[in-house]
Amino acid sequence: MVPVTRITMLSRPACLCVAALACATVLPGAVAAQRDGDAPAFRLSLSTGVIAQDNRGLDATSQGSTFEYFSRLDFGITFATPIQQLDISGGIGLRHVTGAESDNLDTGLIEPDIALRYARQSRDAALSVDLRYSEIDVSSTSLEDVLGIPDPQLVNEEGARRSIVLDTELELRRRSPFGTTLFAGFTGLSYSDTVSTTLTDQDRFRAGVRFRLDLTPVTQANLSLTYRTFEDFGTAEGVRKTFELEGDLRHDMRNGNASLQFGATNTEEGSRYSLSAGRNISTARWEFGGTLGVTRAVDGDLFPTGSVDLTLTLPNGSVAASFSRSIASGVDDDEKEITSLRMTYDRQLTALTSFNTSLSYSETNPTGAGAPSSVGTLGIGLQHSLTADWQVDMELQHRVSENTAGVRARDNRLSVTLRRDLTTWR
């Protein structure tokens, strides 16, 4: 294999160049939007608070409490006309940390992010471009892998993860019975100031096409073909390629819809196949969605898959519950079985005060060799509006995790945040 030399594309100068190129591409549309449409809309959000945790690192034996004092500024601006829109948003935080886990968290200016989204549509076509750049602590409790599953094994790691994401989509023949959508995207992950040898830079590229066929006014068929590449610069495997074929048939009914989905994914380890059927029902007070299917993993084993989502609207709140089980490739491109459960309850206590509680659990289990890991969270929150744009949020959270070595750990987290969302003005 010919060795590949990589120029780190997530360095700050490179990111500035990418952002400048994106601005040069879409800002003419923003200028036109400002000239021909409404004046720009501005948004500004300020927050400050404190977070206390008695075992932030999720150690088997707690090393002591950790206290984070933080402030954050987020902004947004929108240029719009009837046929196009440009959104620019971003933010940056300021933090001071004391206690047992202070070595794993940066202090000072932290976690900047910026995003640009441009969309334009005509009678029969639509174009969208999304560009996002962000930095986040590797040990952040909100850090998730490619599947959106929290990874509790990273809470003891040092350093930062930088990501840049670019997505483009072009939809053609929107009003015709037969339509086509072309899409492409790139995700780059880069790590800095890390000690772990498992945190390595990664690049992902994707491109594909979707076809839509309106069989009747209430029946629609969709077919998509996606080509993906994955490259981990910490290994000598080189570029890994994946081809994915997905299709679904949906029939709309008076109170929802019924659907049938299939998928075939060809990876370098083998092929994965899936088949499922789904039903969605919507009424004035509740909504239900469910799927039931089976997946054949790359090793030939069969796994039952499915999901259930239920939302009930109450006079002063709502109750929601969801459960899912699926087979997919994770951040390291290895196949995993993911099981997740979530329940939430929200209630409006008074005109200014609301209460919520949540319970979540997720388990990730390799379909081949390897041990499972899991994390569960129970949270209680209280929100109170002080004025029209000032709000205080309080949350108490209890976490339990079990890593691949079978070590279980617990953590209690208390946060108090004072937030101000300035009214959008023009």
Image (cartoon, helix red, strand yellow):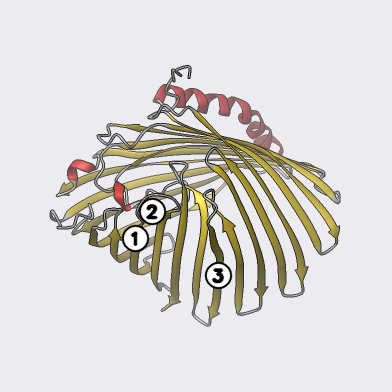
Q: Which residue is label 1 attached to?
A: 375
Front residue (pair 349, 264): 264
Q: Classify 299 as above or below 389.
A: above
Instruction: Check disc 2 and give the amino acid type.
Output: Pro
Residue type, label 1: Val
Label whose residue precedes the other's in the sequence (2 or 3): 2
Residue 87 spot, x, y in % from top left:
57, 41
Query: Label 2 to label 3, Cα distance in Å?
Result: 20 Å
Q: Nearer the viewer, residue 107 or 305?
A: 305
Q: Residue at x 73, y 49 (%)?
A: 223
Q: Secondary structure at mark 2?
A: loop
- Report crowding for label 3: few under 14, some 14 to 19, many 20 or more residues within 10 A (C-alpha): some
Q: How many marks?
A: 3
* Residue 41 or residue 348, whichever sits in front: 348
Mark 2 neighbour density, 10 Å: few (under 14) some (14–19) many (20 or more): many
Residue 287 is at least partly visible in this image: yes
Question: Which residue does the numbered mark 2 point to in the structure image?
Answer: 150
- Residue of label 3: 309
Q: Relative to residue 353, is residue 127 drawn left or right?
A: right
The reply to whether discs 2 and 1 touch (Cβ–Cβ < 8 Å) is yes
Could you tell me residue 145's position as x and y percent?
A: 42, 47
Question: Would residue 73 be found to the left or right of residue 329 on screen?
Answer: left
Q: Which secondary structure lies at badge 3?
A: strand
The residue at 23%/40% (across/down) is: 107
